[in-house]
Amino acid sequence: MLGSEYRKDFGCGSSFSRRGPHLHWHIDVSYINVGGSFFYLCSIQDGYSRFIVHWDLRAQMTELDIECILQAAREKFPAARPRIISDNGPQFIAKDFKVFMRLANPGDQAEARRLIARYVEEYNQRRLHSALGYIAPRDKLQGRDKQIWELRDQRLAAARELRRQRRQQQRDREQRPHNAAGPCAA
């Protein structure tokens, strides 16, 4: 069915995990312009579900800051023992996020935090990812991906059957003999 087309299989070169949640967390630090001042945005993303596990916006980003941010992420998922991956580059800070922040143009750190929280909420809860089979990261993290794909397959099958029936009805109407005198002839 169509569901299998949604599920992209990454090759060996991918650093995102296909085996399960919380095996790899990808950490990234980016600069964010807030009212003319630069702040550091540190975000941690689960490599399996692409769920943003935790993020923080700080005026500085030292090794201790990174350790505190990682600890806060671990406290949200205490059973997780992920391998931490960083390439010291823009691993997963999406272009649309950077555009969003540039257009939103937060005036201060508090406003930037609200905007980032809103973006992360949208990203984790509602944004569909092609690499995840067009499901949201939260759904993937919580293991609802197969259920969502099965429901999609059922809906697509029902829509195909409805279209088939309508085409058949149209062909049946076109094949009926027409009375030359019309339906009102005596």
Image: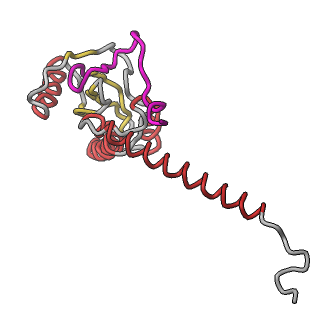
- Which residues make up the magenta segment? 1-25
The residue lying toward the viewer, choosing from 18 and 180, is 180
Nearest to the observer: residue 166 or residue 138: 166
Residue at the image position 9 percent from the left and 29 percent from the top: 78
- The picture places residue 6, in percent across and down from the top left corner, at 46, 32
Q: Quadrant of the C terminus?
A: bottom right
User: In x, y percent, where is residue 67?
Assistant: 14, 21
The answer, for residue 107, to whether it is visible in the render is: no
Out of 3 and 143, give the one closest to the viewer.
3
Magenta stretch contains residue 15: yes
Outermost residue toward the right in this view: 180
At x 13%, y 25%, the residue is 80
Asked if the stretch drawn in magenta spans residue 114, the answer is: no
Question: Overall secondary structure of the magenta stretch?
Answer: loop
Q: Is residue 156 left or right of residue 25?
A: right
Which residue appears at 37% of the width and 21% of the height? 91
43 relative to 65 in the view: left or right? right
Q: Is 87 or 83 nearer to us in this picture?
A: 83
Residue 163 seen in the figure: yes
Where is residue 23? Give x, y as percent.
21, 20
Horizontal and vertical percent for residue 84? Answer: 22, 16
Where residue 172 sits, quadrant-wise, is bottom right
161 to 113, vertically: above or below? below
